[in-house]
Image (spheres, helix red, strand yellow):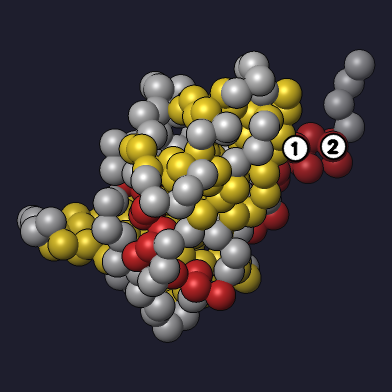
């Protein structure tokens, strides 16, 4: 069957659309970064329209979290105050392993398993006076006796909310989706800051200054 000239022209046009256009039509995962000696700066985007900004020098880093919007060839990052957001996005449950033990998995808001060594969770006993540090498998799973322990304390989030964050245990297996990107839990003591909105020009190979002349961040492959 012979291809019509108009159809052939449309296919050619779609194949050669600039990255910024395809990105704007369908948000996707992407990482933009820059490094200068002992300093680095990174924007990590997910397909839900959220970003994670990590920047710092010589081992001291700060993080910001928010949303991004794309308008033609411009992308704007707007940081959010996470203290105003619920720490837990949702919890999925299913039947437990037995009549005393439940399996718990923590995931980020975009469904990634959280199992970094800096992710610290304690099981609080029924009296509320004692706790046990949870051990996670490579798959991000931890087993808890729900008859002996009543809740889980997520230590990392104390630095976000300035208070302890707990999730009550049930007699069922639980997948707990936290309202944060997985990258935040690479730090034992995250330093969350709120930034003013910032706009860049989005090109095929990275983020440029507003006038499009100076390259600020490279797109990682």
Most distant residue in the bottom direction: 196
User: What separation in Å lies between label 1 and label 2 (alpha carbons)?
Assistant: 6 Å
Name the foreground residue: 88 vs 204.
88
212 over 145 or under it: above or below:
below
The quarter holding residue 69 reads: bottom right
The quarter holding residue 24 reads: bottom right
Crowding at mark 2 (Cα within 10 Å: few <14, some 14-19, many 20+): few
The residue at which mark 2 appears reads as 7
Q: Percent x, y for residue 96?
A: 67, 23
Looking at the rendered image, the quarter that the N terminus falls into is top right
The residue at which mark 1 appears reads as 11
The structure residue drawn at horizontal position 67% and vertical position 32%, both measured from the top left corner, is 171
Secondary structure found at label 2: helix
Instruction: Tell me: 181 left or right of 32.
Output: right
Q: Percent x, y for residue 200?
A: 44, 71
Q: Percent x, y for residue 122?
A: 39, 43
The structure residue drawn at horizontal position 57% and vertical position 23%, both measured from the top left corner, is 101
The structure residue drawn at horizontal position 38% and vertical position 63%, both measured from the top left corner, is 158
Name the foreground residue: 98 vs 72.
98
Marks 1 & 2, CB-CB < 8 Å contact: yes
Secondary structure found at label 1: helix
The structure residue drawn at horizontal position 78% and vertical position 42%, both measured from the top left corner, is 10
Q: Percent x, y for residue 48?
A: 63, 53
142 over 86 or under it: above or below:
above
Instruction: Tell me: 59 left or right of 61.
Output: left
Q: Is residue 18 visible?
A: no
Crowding at mark 1 (Cα within 10 Å: few <14, some 14-19, many 20+): few
Most distant residue in the front direction: 127
Instruction: Tell me: 2 left or right of 32.
Output: right
């Amino acid at each position: 069957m012979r291809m019509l000239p108009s159809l052939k022209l449309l296919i050619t046009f779609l194949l050669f659309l600039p990255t910024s256009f395809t990105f704007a039509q369908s948000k996707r995962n992407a990482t933009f970064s820059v490094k200068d000696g002992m300093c680095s700066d990174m924007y990590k985007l997910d397909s839900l329209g959220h970003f994670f900004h990590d920047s710092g020098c010589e081992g001291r880093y700060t993080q910001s979290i928010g949303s991004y919007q794309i308008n033609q060839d411009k992308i704007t990052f707007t940081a959010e105050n996470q203290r105003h957001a619920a720490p837990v996005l949702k919890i999925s449950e299913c039947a437990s392993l037995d009549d005393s033990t439940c399996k718990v998995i923590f995931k980020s808001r975009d469904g990634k398993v959280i199992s970094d060594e800096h992710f610290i969770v304690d099981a609080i006993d029924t009296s509320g006076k004692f706790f046990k540090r949870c051990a996670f498998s490579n798959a991000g799973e931890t087993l808890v006796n729900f008859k002996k322990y009543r809740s889980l304390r997520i230590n990392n989030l104390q630095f976000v909310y300035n208070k302890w964050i707990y999730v009550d245990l049930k007699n069922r297996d639980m997948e707990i989706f936290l309202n944060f990107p997985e990258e935040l839990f690479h730090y034992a003591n995250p330093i969350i800051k709120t930034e003013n909105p910032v706009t860049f020009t989005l090109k095929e190979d990275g983020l440029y200054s507003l006038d499009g002349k100076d390259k600020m961040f490279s797109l990682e492959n």
